[in-house]
Amino acid sequence: AYDIIRNVPAEDTAVLNRYLTAREHLLRGGMLNEQENERQSFFEFQKALQINPRDEDAQYLLGISRLHERRVLERLATRPDDVNACQELAYIYCQNRRFDDAAALLEKLSVIIRPEPAVYFALARVYEEKGDKRKAIACYEKLLLFDPGNPEVDRRIRFLKAGPFGVPSKDAHR
């Protein structure tokens, strides 16, 4: 890679750096896929495409990892109360910025099964991503019922209730 960069005019190095960064994500995604970490490999392939949308390798690999979403959906069709599959699908939805779908799935799951801390945690994170502080705080507070005094949950609640520079946010109390 150094020989390639050395012979490139200075004005083209930004383009080359983007290309190399995209390839790095592709390689990382391939290694993760071989380790059967489909969720993270999907994310890496998606990053590569965000950097270089014309990359045919990234398009192909992302297409293959979309099969993972279909497999999770098939698992849920036979076992709708599968917490792990729901969380996995919610994660996939979040990676695709489909926060409403992720929230709907986790809300449904929280009603179908007995109260499950992992579901409330995932739902809180989805609401944070959506920017809905009030609902995120409510989910975190439900988590405290399972694990009172959990420092991570307390920290998230304080963070959401505080606005910029530690000033309480009006959105958190609506």
Image: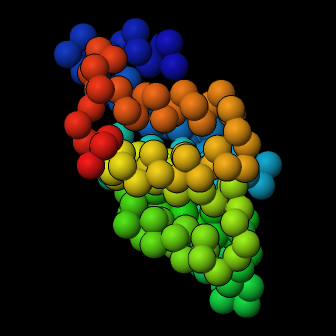
* In-image side of 146 versus 125 (left or right): right
Instruction: Identify whether 65 is placed above or below 57.
Output: below
Residue at (52%, 19%) from the top-left corner?
Answer: 1
Instruction: Identify whether 172 is placed above or below 60.
Output: above
The one nearer the camera, 77 or 45, is 77
Residue at the far left: name it: 11
- Rendered image quadrant of residue 115: bottom right
Residue at the far right: name it: 35
- Rendered image quadrant of residue 114: bottom right
**Residue 59 visible from this viewpoint:** no
* In-image side of 88 versus 44 (left or right): right
* In-image side of 163 versus 158 (left or right): left
Query: Residue 69, percent across and down?
Result: 58, 71
**Residue 105 visible from this viewpoint:** yes
Instruction: Identify whether 78 is placed above or below 138.
Output: below
Residue at (40%, 54%) from the top-left corner?
Answer: 135
Query: Residue 59, percent across and down?
Result: 44, 59
Query: Residue 121, percent across and down?
Result: 60, 50
Residue at the far bottom: name it: 78
* In-image side of 96 versus 28 (left or right): left
Query: Residue 99, percent across and down?
Result: 39, 61
The one nearer the camera, 74 or 4, is 74
Residue at (28%, 20%) from the top-left corner?
Answer: 167
Residue at (66%, 89%) from the top-left corner?
Answer: 77
The one nearer the camera, 4 or 36, is 36
Colour scheme in the image? rainbow
